[in-house]
Image (spheres, coloured by chain):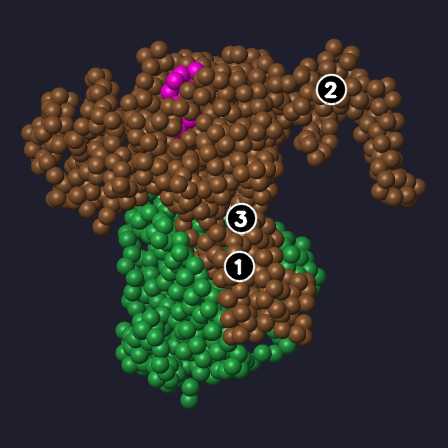
Chain colours: A green, B brown
Amino acid sequence: MLTRRSAIHSITASSASLAMAPFLRSAAAHASGRPEALPKRFVFVLKSSGFDKENLLPAGLEDQWSKDRDKLVDVSLADHALPDNFEPFEEIKDQLTVIQGLSGKNFVGNHTAGYGALSCHHSEQVAIAPTIDCMLGDHLSAGPYKMYGMAMNGPLLEQYTKGPDDSYCYPNISAMKAGQPVAFQASPKKAYMELFGSAVASPAQLKRELKLTTNLMDFMKDDARRIERRLSQEDKQRFARYTEAFEALRLREQKKAVLNDRIKQTAPEITDKYTSQAPSVRIGLHFELATTALITGLTNVITLRPDTLGIIYSDLGVSQHVHALGHLGDGTTGNGWNGPRARKEIDKLHLGCVAKMARKLKSIPEGDGTMLDNTMIVYTSCTGGQHHDGQRDWPFVLVGGMSEKMKMGRYLQYPSYQQAGHRTIANLYMSLLQVAGMKTDAHFGQLDSQLKDLDLAGPLAELMA
Amino acid sequence: MPLPRFALISIYGILFAIVPGPAPLLCAAAPGPPTFDTAVRPFLNEYCFECHSGQNAAGKPGLSELKPDLVEDAEAQAWMQVLQVLQFDDMPPPEEDRPDPAAKAEVIEWIERQMESSGRGEVHRAKLLKPEYGNYVSHELLFSGTVTTPPFSPSRLWRFSPQIFKGKGIRDAKSPFSFVTSEGGVRDYSATSGVDRSTVEMILINTNQLLDLRTEDGDFKNFADRQETPTDEQLEELIRIEFRRAVGRLPAEQEQHKYLVFLKKNIADGGRMEGLKTTLKAMYLSTESIYRMELGLGPKDKHGRRHLSPDELSYAVAYALTDHSPERNDVIRRAIRGRNLSTRPDIALVVQEMLDAGMNPRSTPRISRFFEEFFGYNKADKVFKDMARVREEDIKQWNTNRLMYEAEQLVEYFINRDQDVIEQLLTSNQFYVAHPGNNQIAREYLTESLRPDYVELKVSQRLDAFIQAKRDPERQQEKEELDRIRRQAEERAKVTGWAIEDGLRPFPGWPYTRQIRGQSDLIYIGVYNLPPTSRVERQHWDWPVEQPFEMPTDQRAGILTHPAWLAAHSVNDGNDPVRRGRWVQEKLLAGVIQDVPPDVDANVPNDPHKTLRERMEPLRAERCWRCHRKMNPLGEPFEMFDDWGRYRTHVYFDKEGKIVHRRGQQFDKWLAEGKLTERTIDASGEIRGSGDPQVDGKVTNAIDMIHRIGRSDRARQSFIRHLFRYFMGRNEMLSDSMTLVAAEKAYLDNGGSFKALVVSLLSSDSFVYRR
């Protein structure tokens, strides 16, 4: 049977340069099977247009959103039937956690908090701080990619491209740091070629590509050296980051080359689905590629943007775009759904993909458990609950585990905004950072001045095992 | 580790032999570095020990017990605090005599030197490179005329701005470059504009995408499909074309050769097409595609400074005034071809000619952007105003785009008129409202609207346009369009007739054209305290065809009283005196304000019964007032305006004592019925620290304050410092003193000429020399 351990053994057996050492060391550590050495992975899935909170309530629990809830609800999902949309999670119920009542009210924007949704800053269109996915990626990923993003579309790289689906785009979701947004791949085909291209390339082709990359990076470094000699000490330090980039990019290609055998084993099959424009097909492919990239060890952090306000889920029979559905109310779509129903069906589609990814990871042994035990999938919206909600209640669905450092199988609902015991999405992110082995300060991101009377330090205690 | 020269000089008050380099950068009569015994102890003795000796209330050692070094953490913290209170002029207390600036500068220098020697300097140094710390260099010393150090800029790479990237036209690719400087000031700074892995990745993504598109377009078809092997000449030609496309100039012979070798190697390793693409990627990733190169490749002078080469100069001048490379500018191109761009007088001539051709957002976009970044009026649309407030407060139409444009028109007018520019921008009561910005064009539209055959004229103009565009006027769509034109013209003629009956100059309205921005009504002008009317209403304002025109002197004085500036410096439900005061303190008084302490609660308490000024009263508590005394007294004078920019004299309260914000008919009715009580607005304030006793003192309102500050030496010098930062892309160092003094002199000697100021700065030693 294919296991990560066998694959990693095959990696470490191949020869590689000194620069590869950390990557290989971490691969070897993972291969040892010790729980603390097992790789940790995160997947962030950020839908647009909010996430209807009614659809997240397990059976038998009272809806209390309209009241000023001052009590924490913390119940085991084992004791409650899951809401309808969560049916595909039934068999992994103990690795599912639903959280409601967190706020992120100060990360405002026009229909989206943009980068703020993952950086906890008021940062819709311009990245002013690193986002949590990039921070985790930087900490966890030893593979070729620190993190990898796929989106349905977004502000386009080029207006001349044939469509938003055929290129990289900037969905304003992830940033390495201030002013450094991460491009997401919108085309499943291009994502495939980038991640798994070596599976369909001949050895000669691969060699050629690596040679050309090496040529380019060498040329650039040599060219830069000419300039470097003339710079002041201060500018030299700044300039070094430019020259180091070439080394880093070359290293990425080298790391991919080391993973070639593994990539060949795991690469998904290229089918005619890859040319489909149907939203649900494209979303499905993004999830499939993401799952395989994690299994292959190409990265440890993936962020997916399964839709934007402009997407029309025509293959679900919906005639309006996502934004219009948020305002549809009792009006109907082409297939007769009203607004809330159409939104629920979209959530269902996404949750189905999340569940499929989780089940796949659960099928692969790792250490004493499965890959899912060391992976956390975080499904939420870039703008909190509902379509125009003001982010007082920002729902999250977590699936997976973190070497048992996180209590799963729970339904948590925190006290309402400004009530004692209320917590924010920053508290959740601190929990994620800590279970990933990262140190956090007392707070993450910008504080909400309207919550100044509450103690908002540290992670969500209810989640931490 | 060797200390970076550039940073040291920006920190230290005076230049000393610590600066490495072949020629000493000493002032003519510079003393040795200040020591604790010669500079610090006497200063503390005179100004501080009286209150700060012995143990303080918290039991911590007082100043007199501090060790004279920064080795221990606790001592270091205490000294940093001393540094801050001196830099921010927080101590001695305001009522005490101010210390001698030179003596203070020595104490600051001593502390900073100790920070360096104890390894605590780096964080501080990095901070001082940011634009918001530009004012840290002593203003008095900069303009004292006593510093004679030959000015220079550090030799550097300056990453392209997003605007330059856009102009380079990799189709519409997203710019891999963005500013990380704060939004409230100069954005494009060389020291803060980094390029790292993610930028390089973005450039690669852009380039891959571009090459894919060009391949699809068949750009490389001949090269890829040709049967025979390309000759060296063919490859060289290809390199020339592509290099020019990527870098913006032809390659030098050596470069040409280097790329040829590279291309051939790539073709051998990866095949013809992939080999070419790899080679092109190198061009787009090359330093010159990313950075402005200002290394100083010209001759070295006796002070160890290197002149920018003619090539470097051509780029420096082009990017100082425009977003395009020198090849795209006629004046610079001519100068390069005639070999007339290598000395300071050469630059002066080129810059003068570029400015004389007219300064506007198209020809000199960088000049226009300076005024936007300096004043910030272009951010009026960034402040969200609730539509419910727009209705309730009788705004009719909140047209921020138009207001920002009218502020821009004013700037364009004054800089091209070129007399007492700084003073006029700050104090003039001349404004543009609903005007094309060109009196000739305004007269033409007015004349046209007065013609008896106006309606027929408009219809026949449209008919001509149809014929020109080969559209059939008999078709249904065209017929409907003609009907619409006729109806609109008839409406206009009717309103024009009413205005003439009422003895007013009719507002003609005009469409968008290439030269001017269209405007069809006067509905938005209420924010200027002028009577708003829609295009079908009877006009109430005697529209001045010749503009700018004079607004009431008690209501408006310059850009800071322009609704665009006032709105940009407001919050969504009211005025923002703190930010406005900070603006005046930093931009006009060259003052510094401490970073907001982390535990400050920035909320102003809500109370419908109190004016904003009253609600801010708690800031006058001692702890807050240390910083807020530098802002509130300069920002509260603007309370004579509401946050839409309307001049006001009174605030009104209802029967319950709540402030009434409603305006319009209902408000007028309540007022007439005696249902409201009124109180005169308190817009008083105070100017401190202008360096001129004639300027300092209490002010009655913003108009009074602006007239005093706007004509002061300090405001002029502070403006010049900001312009310097903008052009040089860095904070001024004390060694730039001669440049700044000369720039001010050029401005004054030429009757307050902005052009003379720009010419002086761009032909200064600071601009042309690198070290």
Dividing the image into 4 quarters, which one contains the C terminus of chain B? top left
Residue B165 is marked as 3
Judge by depth and name the residue closer to the eye, B470 or B280. B280
- Does residue A449 appear to the left or right of B453 in the view shown? left
Which chain is indicated by disc 3?
Answer: B
Which label's residue is closer to the chain start, 2 or 3? 3
Residue B357's tag is: none
CA separation, marks 2 and 3? 40 Å
Residue with the mark numbered 2: B443
Q: Which SS class for mark 3?
A: helix
Question: Looking at the rendering, which quadrant does residue A167 occupy?
Answer: bottom right
Query: Which residue occupies 72% across, 24% down?
Result: B441
In magenta stretch: residue A402 = no
Residue under the image location 53 percent in, 69 percent down: B264
Q: Residue furthest right?
A: B474
Q: Is residue B222 visible?
A: yes
Q: Nearer the viewer, residue B230 or A420?
A: B230
- Label 1, label 2: how far apart the Cα atoms are: 57 Å
